[in-house]
Image: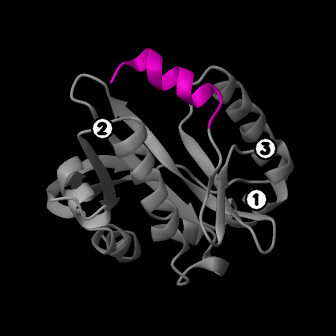
Amino acid sequence: MKKEAVIKRFKKIPVIETERLRLRRMRVEDCADMFEYSKRQDVTEYLLWSPHPNKTHTKKYLEYIKTRYDDGEFYDWAVELKSEQKMIGTCGFTTFDFTNNSAEVGYVINPVYRGKGYAPEALLEVMMFGFLELNLHRIEARYMDGNDASRRVMDKLGMKYEGCARSSLFVKGQYRSINTCAILSDEFIKRYLKVE
């Protein structure tokens, strides 16, 4: 996988639909929906970023993201609940390792909509895109100690626990242990496409 090919693909980030969700480009018009969850301390407790202080901050962030999309260097989708036409979170690739043909994924769901299976539903489509469209060899996800809900999403999709980097990240004034789960392309294809 070449970086140029990924940039070209994400300059026009495709819309991906499931029965309940639409994964699409984030828009400035999503400001109120994003601020609804990004302002919450409980949402950012296990993330690298802090709560958004106001809607202006969220709007400026979305304006910045538009420029990243235009450059083909932003790999995250808005997760829209089709029945409400509302953005309820994000899901996508956080980083690519082009040399080793792998990527890391991440996701955030508004707590009001948690517990309904939206995170695994969105992440499955992102992983499908990664393995089938981008021909990735490996997809991994990381989570901070204590973020059991995130780990359950990884387990549900067949990602295997690989280990813990103890106190490896200094975040918001404290050292946090970071755990990694991953799935390989052949494991994913066997599980979801029933190909032996």
Q: How crowded is mark 1: few (under 14 residues within 10 Å), some or many (20 or more)?
A: many
Q: Which of marks 1 and 3 is nearer the N terminus?
A: 3
Could you say which disc has been placed on residue 136 in the image? Answer: 2
Residue 133 picture location, percent across and down: 42, 38
Residue 45, horizontal then vertical, whole percent: 49, 65
Residue occupying the point 69% across, 53% down:
52
- The kind of residue on which mark 2 rests is Leu
Q: In this view, does 117 lie to the left or right of 21?
A: left
What residue lies at 32% left-to-right and 74% top-to-bottom?
A: 156
Residue 30 in view, yes or no: yes
Start-end of magenta stretch:
1-13
Mark 3 = which residue? 27
Choose the circle earlier in sequence order: 2 or 3. 3
**Residue 150 sits in which quadrant?**
bottom left
Residue bearing mark 1: 35
Q: In this view, does 6 lie above or below 48?
A: above
CB atoms at circles 2 and 1 under 8 Å apart? no
Q: Using the rendered image of the protein, determine whether residue 47 is visible from the camera's viewpoint.
A: no
Q: Quadrant of the N terminus?
A: top left
* Residue 10 included in the magenta stretch of the image: yes
Residue 50: x percent and y percent? 58, 53
Q: Which of 93 and 41 is in front in this view?
A: 93
Q: Is residue 47 magenta?
A: no
| Amino acid under disc 3 | Arg
- What colour scheme does the image use? one colour
